[in-house]
Amino acid sequence: MSDVSMIIDGERRAAPATFGVVNPATGAVHADAPDCSREQLDEAFAAAAKAFTDWRRDEDARRAALRQASAALRGAVDRIAPVLTAEQGKPLKAARGEANGASYWLNYFAELPLQREVIQDDERARAEVVRRPVGVVAAITPWNFPVMLAAWKIGPALLAGNTMVLKPSPFTPRSTLLMAEVLAEVLPPGVLNVVSGGDELGRWMTAHPVPRKISFTGSVATGKHIAASAAPDLKRVTLELGGNDAAILLDDVNPAEITERLFSGAFTNSGQVCSAIKRLYVPQRLHGDVVDALATRAAAARVGDGMDPQTELGPVQNRPQFDRVRELVAEALAGGAKAATGGAPIDGPGYFFQPTILAGATEGTRIVDEEQFGPALPVIPYRDVDEVVARANGTMYGLSGSVWSADPDRALAVADRLDCGTAWVNTHIALGPHQPFGGVKWSGIGVENGPWGLAAYTDIQVQYVAKN
């Protein structure tokens, strides 16, 4: 039996079976989670469909419930954070920050207006565009920020009047299940149902006849499968997928002044951030200085168990991802790249990898061409701005990017040329609930957050009243 439960129709529910959850700091199973059956999934969707009838009717009640949900989650931070660290690996301080951030996101949406727009008001008629809920939402969240990214979906979906069935990643289910238990104390039964299981459960969800929208955050490959699964039933989709974010330093930067921000932009959460810096382009004359500065910083990073208060970077979250990072770095080194620091796993139990700065890797190397999603960063020289913009854009990814310069206006002019959903200047991974987040090309369909993300959980209805 698992000590955490699924939430179906407001009640804690066990499952016929459980599956093991690995602590990435040890590489060993440390706890169990419920393995939802197909019948239980049907019950969850039926509960969501039933709750939708009343939930959609009262906007004020929805806002009050979201405020209560935010407060309940904020009060449970110290319960959720150690569960999150144990299964995800991030430092306990970061886990607390994630849980607090999820509370903040819910409160933001509790206060966000649901816009109505008058498009005609004359002697003939009054016409107004209103936003209506789509119905039941199927939400699937990833393992890098399971609690936060659940809140990204729960907040706007519920404010708009939808109900939800949510499935966390099987690598990190327990923190989301605990979050669901907390929210079940303040949300009406059936409004938010949370189930856990493996990839098969996700396939059942996306093909299920009840949900009218799928909201997914995860890999490009899985996102393509979900889009195909949604197509026969014309389900709406929001897909926030992978990124291979390029950061470009212009020739007037002082490497010493931006090293810490560059390191944070690339190595936060051990590089396991969809919008993290994955490729760093540097003018040839500054390349050596930037490599040396980042290597010194990376070598000084304290890597360890997230439960240790001295830990700065935790492990790679799961064995398949750990093996992928190891493989990409090894291939780059075999192809002639040099590790200015790092370059190999850390001896001992768990999925720990040395923070790695690579010089000499360029396009045609998988760690440059693909998303590594781990603690390894290639630093790549370039000759001129036109060339580097073309190289940064020369990928099917288009999530985020950044440009760095002593002259922000100059940097902005370059950032304007990047083919990506967010282009930052002199920073990276600057996110907020008011700010739309999404990608172009293979990095996704639609956006999350802000009024734009809220609109994605609605359908438009025109209400036309004739006056004559």
Image (cartoon, rainbow, N blue to C red):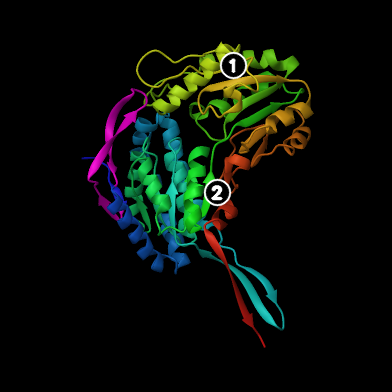
- Determine whether 387 is above or below 360 in the image: below
Highlighted magenta segment, given as a residue range: 8-36
* Residue beneath the point at 36% across and 38% down: 170
Image coordinates for residue 186, horizontal then vertical, percent: 35, 56
Is residue 210 or residue 102 the one in the foreground? 210
Image coordinates for residue 1, horizontal then vertical, percent: 20, 40
Q: Quadrant of residue 209?
A: bottom left
- Determine whether 367 is above or below 41 in the image: above
Residue 25 painted magenta: yes
Q: Main secondary structure of the magenta part?
A: strand
- Determine whether 1 is above or below 318 in the image: below
* Residue beneath the point at 55% across and 63% down: 459
Residue 5 painted magenta: no
Tell me the tag on residue 258: none
Tell me which numbered mark, 2 or 1, is placed earlier along the sequence: 1
- Left or right: residue 460 versus residue 345 is right
Is residue 159 or residue 196 the one in the foreground? 196
| Alpha carbons under labels 2 and 1: distance apart | 33 Å
- Determine whether 204 is above or below 413 in the image: below
The amino acid type found where label 1 is placed reads Leu
Residue placed furthest toward the bottom: 468
Q: Quadrant of residue 419?
A: top right
Tell me the tag on residue 448: 2
What is the secondary structure assignment of the residue under circle 1? strand
**Residue marked by disc 1:** 358
The amino acid type found where label 2 is placed reads Glu
Is residue 207 or residue 42 the one in the foreground? 207
Residue placed furthest toward the front: 232
Report if residue 296 is visible in the image.
Answer: no
